[in-house]
Image (cartoon, grey):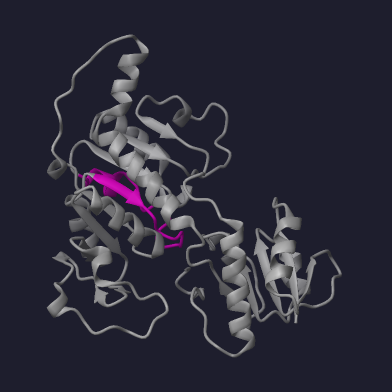
Amino acid sequence: MRIAFCCTDTASEPWLLGLRAALPGADLSLWAPGAPPADYAVVWAPPQQFFDEQAQLKAVFNIGAGVDALLKLKLPPQAQIVRLDDAGMSVQMAEYVCHAVIRHFREFDAYEADTGQGKWSFRKPRARGDFPVGIMGLGVLGTRVARSLAQFEFAVNGWSRSPKVLGDWVTERSAPCPPPALRAPPLPTQNALPPSHLEGVKCFSGADGFKDFLAASRVLVCLLPLTPDTRDIMNRDSLSRLQAGGYVINVARGAHLVEDDLLTLLDSGHLAGATLDVFRTEPLPVGHPFWTHPKITVTPHTSARTLRSESIAQIAGKIAALQRGEPVAGVVEPSRGY
């Protein structure tokens, strides 16, 4: 079994050492043009030349959560794309989003500004019921974020583009997740979730459900995969449907957000602020208005980083399973984009 490693802007040696330890019988090497054919590939931002030369690949393992860049390339038709299920990213994402929501809700940014001026200030406590949080995308990361926010007693809404089976329940537009007695029986999936994972989350789906979802939310969190259907999904029309004083948190992809529309709604007062971790151009260009806008918090695409040891264990386990002829979780459906 031969494995090719082709990860741009990634220190290769720690990955190669870890993968060799996890798959001692494999012939694992760093890819270079003209390298011998491999059975599997571990990649991040590989060039088209890699796939042109590696036409016999059985599966391609992406070391990041998003696969949108990979889907722009022409891969061998038989090669499955396999994404990481979690690899330590979901807890990081939950930390980041909860921090952003709580910082806004508790007005810690305003307190920070006051204390920076030596001012001892008081602000009237706000009610959680006035700050329902809407999460776009109910995959592994979105599910973990929803569950974490619910622990802080925020009202949480969830939206997916189609009714989605998550473990042993199905989302229904404009209806709360059903009680245990009404839930469908468990399905045979490796990603089954206990019933309590989305307890109390109000679930929406589809185009009609999207409008209702936005109207029910004051804080909007984007955790969608980037596809042709979701590009520019946060625009003037959709963001205007949020409750007055809305707040936007984008931790998915920069192309989900129409930047000028966000700025317009912030300046009009309909939106109160935004926390942005991803951008259309990264690094965020010098002079971009997001750097200095008083209502925008910028972080450098750091909401959830790949944890190498957990990723290696997951990739190695999936390669071993494929070698045994067994199915694996995380296989991407190119027509859906995730």
Q: Is residue 126 left or right of residue 113?
A: left
Quadrant where the N terminus sits is: bottom right
Please state the horizontal and vertical placement of residue 165, each as a whole percent of the image. Answer: 30, 75
Task: Estimate the x, y position of residue 112 in percent, counting from the top left.
Answer: 34, 21
Q: Is residue 288 above or below residue 238?
A: above
Residue 99 in magenta stretch:
no
Which quarter of the picture shows residue 210? bottom left
Residue 317 vertical placement versus 33 (above, below)? below
Image spot of residue 88 (x, y percent): 49, 58
Magenta range is 219-242
Q: Can residue 194 be seen at all in this image of the molecule?
A: yes
Q: Residue at x 39, y 47 (%)?
A: 95
Q: Quadrant of residue 174?
A: bottom left
User: At x 71% / y 65%, what residue is drawn?
Assistant: 48
| Along the viewing direction, whichever of 167 and 282 lies nearer the viewer | 167
Q: What residue do we see at 38% from left, 65% from top?
A: 139
Residue nearest the viewer, comparing 276 with 100: 100
Residue occupying image coordinates x 44% and y 72%: 336
